[in-house]
Structures are given as structure tokens and as C-alpha cells.
Amino acid sequence: MVQDERYMHRCLDLAILGAGSVSPNPMVGAVILHEGRIIGEGYTSPYGGPHAEVNAIQDAYQKLGEAEAQIRFRTSTMYVSLEPCSHFGKTPPCADKLVELQFKRVVIGCLDPFAKVNGQGVKKLQYAGMDTTVGVLRDACTFMNRRFFTRIQQQRPYVILKWAQTDDGFFSPEDAAQQWISNNASKQLVHKWRGEEDAILIGTSTALIDNPGLKTRLWNGKNPKRILIDKSLKVPADAAIFDEEADTIVFNANQTDWQKNKKLIALEHFDLYLPQQMLYQLYLMDVQSLIVEGGAKTLQSFIDAGIWDEARVFVSRQRWGRGKPAPLLKKSAATVQKVGNDDLNIYLNGRNS
Ligand code: AOF
Ligand code: ZN
């Protein structure tokens, strides 16, 4: 039904407002429609807070008063981009709430793959005799929570590779002196991206040569957890990656320690070319998404292991003729956008696109 899709689109618009604050919860939006009018809407609160459905109900209470809202719920449709939960987590089950308030109909975008829900939410609604529709804008609803789905279904964070290269495939000059391929617009975009993910990863050389702080200075976002691969702990304590403004996790070969905002994790069989073990550790820490910012060797290890979900590659018009080669993607299907000016393009590669 066209109307269902229209209000599911609204749910998606609401859901995205939780980007950067709800993880490891999924981003969910909810809309309550009564006789053709929206009487309440909401989206997932920051992690640990109420879910989208409960916020939409609260919104209706505020607008109409609790008694009037509850009368109207019985002839209302609740649109929600993810299956209402059926379990007691940090909050009580949303499905029970919808049953208790006797909504007339519930329209759901996609099922929740989380083992404690996974169809149980829909069953609860159906057992209570509610008119239930599942799968409206299913693909868009699933895509919106691709990070959540990846964590739950693959037991690893969603991996986004990001780098900049010249038109002729070079990553950095041979002499290792810094030379910017990116421009102001791309730097700002990268800071926005950092704020959208749980964690950001770099290798030893990048930390030693570029000394990045890996924060979101140019954008109003939260700082991601910083992850450093440093086998023999070569990066000095005064490096920007260890400043007090965000937490840092260091994967290394032999030390396990917690000091201030720095956590050392010793990997039993340290191997830069096997990112799986690091990703599993991050999964255990509820890290839902990871943006890998370099260098070329680190990026290539994810590509070679076949573990990446998106590659966002800035390509400038510059041609250097020589330098350190950029990572090589076997797959090249990508959408291309300009960034800031005509000299820089961004290639957005999706693994499944
Ligand atoms: C919903 N609506 O808006 C979201 C849901 O610990 P809790 O109570 O916050 O539950 C977390 C789980 O609830 C999470 O893993 C996912 O399965 C679901 N998220 N469910 O009904 C929402 N964010
Ligand atoms: Zn819920």
C-alpha cells in the first residue's frame, strides 16, 4: 500500500536521527497514524534509553493527554522500521506495550535478527489478534541497520575502509613526507563519518608518520573509540592517539593492561594479516562498526581477508607517477560523487552492490 510506504519512509527519516548515539542498539523510527494524521512519532533514545515505539507513545501522550491518546490508539496504526522487541533488556518489551494499548494495526519494516527477538515480537502481536504487516520497505530498513545486522549475524563489526589516492593509484609519496590528496570538504566529510561509527582503526606506521588524533574536530559528532595495531608497542605515549579526549585500544603481541583511557589487548597469535581475531575482540566489546583509515598495508589486510563491507575512496586528479601504491580492490563497481571541487571524487564501493 502506498500509504504504508509513505509512513515507513517517515520512520526511516526519524530513525537516522539516532545515528552515532544509539549503538549498539539499532536505529529505529516509529510513527502513530490516526485517521490519516500523525499523532505521535519517535526514534530510539541513546543506548539504554526507551525504544522508538515507546517514544512515539510518549509523544502522543504529550500532544493529546494520556487518556485521549489511549482512546485513539485503538483505532491507530503503529508504523515501526524494526520488529518491536519481545524481550526484557534494558527496557521492557515493546510488543507487550503495543498489545496492552490495543493498537489496531502494526506495520513493520523488517524483522529483528537479535536471537531474543527474531520473530517473537511479531508472534506476540499476532497471538493478541492484531492486524500485522511485515516487510514494508524491507530492504531500506535492513540497510539502515546494516551495522547492527552485521554484528548480530556475523559476530563482527561492520567494516568501512577509507582512503585517498591519486588518479594513477598512489597512496603516499615514496619519501613518506605528508602530502594532502584530500581537500577541506573531504576532511570535513571524514570527520562526519568518524562520528557515525563506533570505532576507528589505524596501523603503527600511520600513527608514527601522520600522528592523527582521529577525532571529529571538524564536525559536531562524538569521537569514536580509537583502535591502534601496534605489535611491539612502538607508538610513544605522547602520540595524539593517546590524548584524553577519547578511549584507545591497542592490539599488540604481549601486553594486557588498562591505564587511563588506554587499553592494551594482547593477541595470542598476532598477525596483521588476520584481522578476524581483532574484529572478534571488538565484537565482544559491542563495537558495532569500524572505520579503517590506514595505512595501505592495514587496509590491504582487510581486503585480502575478504572482510569489508564498504570502501570509501577519495580519488584526486593528481598523477604522481611513483609512490607507495594504494590498496587494490578486486571489485570496482562504485557510485561516484564530487567532493568540494572538480579535482576530487569519491568512489563509494559497497561489497554487495
Ligand atoms: C525495538 N525498538 O527502537 C530498538 C530495538 O536492552 P534493550 O532493552 O535496549 O534492547 C536492545 C535490543 O532491542 C536490541 O538488541 C534490538 O534487538 C532491539 N532494539 N527494538 O523494539 C527500538 N532499538
Ligand atoms: Zn523495544
Image (cartoon, rainbow, N blue to C red):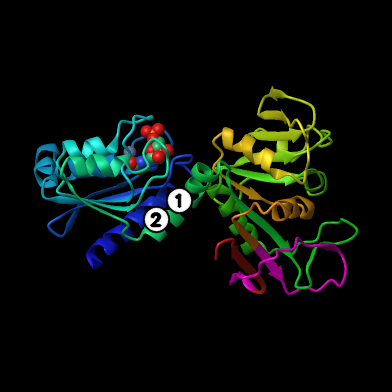
Can you tell me which quadrant of the image ligand 2 is in? top left
The percent position of residue 121, horizontal first and vertical second, equals: 30, 41
Q: Tell me the amino acid under the disc marked 2.
A: Cys
Say which quadrant the C terminus sits in.
bottom right
Residues packed near mark 2 inside 10 Å, few (<14), some (14 to 19) or many (20 plus): many
Asked if residue 151 lies left or right of residue 129, the reply is right
For residue 340: magenta?
yes
Residue at 89 percent of width and 60 percent of height: 174
Residue at 73 percent of width and 44 percent of height: 274
Q: Is residue 173 visible?
A: yes
Seen from the viewer's position, the closer of residues 60 and 255 is 255
Residues packed near mark 1 inside 10 Å, few (<14), some (14 to 19) or many (20 plus): many
Q: Tell me the amino acid under the disc marked 1.
A: Asn
Seen from the viewer's position, the closer of residues 69 and 104 is 104
Q: Residue 169's quadrant in the figure?
A: bottom right
Compute the Cα span from label 1 to label 2. 7 Å
Disc 1 residue lies near ligand 1 with CB under 8 A: no
The disc placed on residue 44 is none
Mark 2: which secondary structure? helix
Which residues are drawn in magenta?
313-341
Instruction: Please give the residue where the numbered disc 1 appears in the rendered image.
Output: 145
Q: Residue 115's quadrant in the figure?
A: top left
Residue at 24 percent of width and 39 percent of height: 124
Q: Where is 282 relative to 72, above or below? A: above
Instruction: Please give the residue where the numbered disc 2 appears in the rendered image.
Output: 141
Asked if disc 1 and disc 2 are in contact, CB closer than 8 Å, the reply is yes
Q: Where is 349 relative to 319, above or below? A: above
Seen from the viewer's position, the closer of residues 6 and 106 is 106
The percent position of residue 63, horizontal first and vertical second, equals: 18, 45
